[in-house]
Amino acid sequence: MIPYLQKNKLNLKKLLTIRQNVGIIVSVVKFLRDCFKKVVDIG
């Protein structure tokens, strides 16, 4: 039972880090898109 819980904790940690990474990637993509829109508007 306890090893199972430890395994789940590791999986939860992995999921959390994956979610954090996805959030970072999404914000970077949004930032790049905004920059691209500004460049297109200027051009």
Image (spheres, helix red, strand yellow):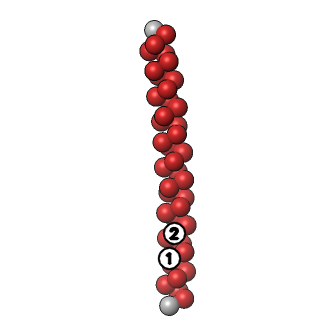
> What residue is shown at x 52% (from left), y 40% (from top)?
27
> What residue is shown at x 48% (from left), y 42% (from top)?
26
> What residue is shown at x 54% (from left), y 53% (from top)?
20
Q: Position of residue 23 (x, y in %)?
A: 51, 48
Location of residue 33 with respect to 21 vertically, above or below? above
Location of residue 36 with respect to 41 vertically, above or below? below
**Extreme residue toward the top, this view:** 43
Q: Assess disc 2: are there few (<14), some (14-19) or many (≥20) residues with their C-alpha within 10 Å of its C-alpha.
A: few
Q: Which residue is mark 2?
A: 12
Q: Which mark is residue 21?
A: none
Q: Assess disc 1: are there few (<14), some (14-19) or many (≥20) residues with their C-alpha within 10 Å of its C-alpha.
A: few
Could you tell me if the residues under marks 2 and 1 are in contact, i.e. CB atoms within 8 Å? yes
The amino acid on which the numbered mark 2 sits, given as a three-letter code, is: Leu
* Numbered label tally: 2
Q: Position of residue 32 (x, y in %)?
A: 50, 29
Location of residue 26 with respect to 39 vertically, above or below? below
Task: Work out how far the residue at label 2 is from the one at label 1, CA to CA, in angstroms.
Answer: 6 Å
The amino acid on which the numbered mark 1 sits, given as a three-letter code, is: Asn
Q: Which quadrant: the C terminus? A: top left
Q: Which residue is mark 1?
A: 8
Location of residue 18 with respect to 38 vertically, above or below? below
Q: Position of residue 4 (x, y in %)?
A: 49, 84
> What residue is shown at x 49% (from left), y 10% (from top)?
42
Q: Secondary structure at mark 2?
A: helix
Q: Secondary structure at mark 1?
A: helix
Q: Position of residue 41 (x, y in %)?
A: 46, 13
